[in-house]
Amino acid sequence: MTLMAQHRTVRTRLVRTRVLAAICAALLTFASVPLAACSAPAPEEATHLLIKVPRTGHDVVFDESISYADEVLTNMVESFKAAYDRPVDIEVEVFEQNQYDNAIVECFDTDKAPDILYGDYFNMSTYIYTGRVVPLDDVVTPEVREGIFGQLWDMSTVDGRVYMMPYLSRQNVLAYNKGLFQQAGLDDFIDDSTIQSWTLDEWTYILDTLAKQLPDGTFPMMMYAKSSQGDTHIMTLLRAAGSDFFDESGHFNIATPKGIAALQWIRDGVDRGWFPPHSENLEIEDCSSLFRQGQLALYMVNNASIGRYGDTIGLVNFPRADGEGCATAFVSGFEVFDNGDAEKVQIAKDFLSYVYASEDLMNYAAGTLPASKAVSERYGDEILQFDLFFENRDNVVDFTGNNPDTRAVREIFYTCIHDMLMGDLTPEETARAIDERCNYAIDQGTATATLHD
């Protein structure tokens, strides 16, 4: 073979080798694509849920680091996420107490619509009738139902179905400043061992005595009617002469002799100096400030707020003619909303099932009156005045009537009281105005109410 022929042979072999190498490299590259996809699958995308909660103080007897309800919810979320069998991203968003509708209704059909709401029943029960709130009967297992105090399930149920899950409650009564009572010579009415109940005659005597004996700038009792904040306590005062407040259908029933007598009792109090002047222009917070400063003898408190006053106060129920007295209960708990995503609804239910099955998470209600019987037994001795409020539960009355538009009713009620305190309406006219206007709002709410199927 000539030298030139040998060179051609070598070149041919080199070319063939390079072509074969390129082909092999291409085949290896092509083959590696599906293999990589099988060995390292893309992570499952986390489902996003939004929990909304009003800015609410929250105490826990065993954890001083907790100051607000959203901190408890954050603990619940982190525990649930760690235990759940699929990735979830749960956001906790806080809104202001007077912004319920802005945070809930006005966010429907947007990316800010809540999947879960934690709040006070008297503010959130209205949303049940939008058709967005999901029944939770499948979350309420026999064990869960048995573990919660029965009257709280009654307050959570509409047309036989559970729409709200109770977590805790606060019981509202009245507090009296013991120092001001002593100053007015009312020592006989001071009793630290119980939540007292006074007859209406005793109430009248006490308030008249305070009005005469207290120094200028100090007043016997709270009164306010500038806004709907605190109106539920004024509603409770309308039972003072024995009125049941609602009729059997849940409508207002104030235009009766007992209802009018209670309104007259309040109106007479304006002229007798029972209340701060121009109380029609006061907010509940104005009266709270007066009480904290020692300028008001009687003011509303609950079992979660009494700690700030130490031993300076005694407790008494709201007045009622029979002397038994009455109190109100403010329940807080959860709702689940259907925003058109069945997967999110199920995860929200799974979240509640997890919380109500967790001893640790239910324990965070131990700072007020827990909904859980077991938590009450575990921590009752550590919760301030737990026994007093627990024993007083039979005096609790319903201040909502379970009507479909509590918030609309509240926006009407206080205006009637405002006009009466001003002297623009007589007690009789006020009673008729409350019944007519509030019942119209109830009927309108009923006519447009829709329950989730």
Image (cartoon, rainbow, N blue to C red):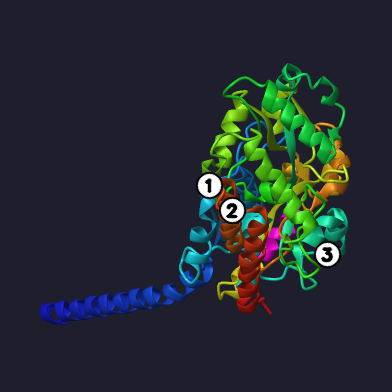
Q: Are marks 2 and 3 in contact (CB under 8 Å)?
A: no
Amino acid type for the residue under numbered disc 1: Lys
- The residue located at (62%, 46%) in the rendering is 230
* Position of residue 34 in the picture relative to residue 85 (left or right): left
Q: Which residue is mark 3?
A: 141
Q: Nearer the viewer, residue 179 or 14?
A: 179
Specify the label residue 414 is tagged with.
2
Specify start and end residues of the magenta stretch as a single range. 347-356
Residue 175, x across and y down, in percent: 73, 32
Q: Main secondary structure of the magenta part?
A: helix
Q: Are marks 2 and 1 in contact (CB under 8 Å)?
A: yes
Q: CA distance from mark 2 to mark 1?
A: 7 Å
Residue 380, x across and y down, in percent: 84, 37
Callout 1 crowding tier (Cα within 10 Å): few <14, some 14–19, many ≥20 = some
Q: Which residue is mark 1?
A: 226
Against 62, is 415 above or below?
A: below
Dot 3 falls on a residue whose secondary structure is loop
Residue 191, image quadrant? top right
Q: CA distance from mark 3 to mark 1?
A: 44 Å
Against 149, is 179 above or below?
A: above
- The residue located at (58%, 34%) in the rendering is 276
Q: Earlier in the sequence, mark 3 or mark 1?
A: 3
* Position of residue 249 in the picture relative to residue 3 (left or right): right
Residue 252, x across and y down, in percent: 71, 63
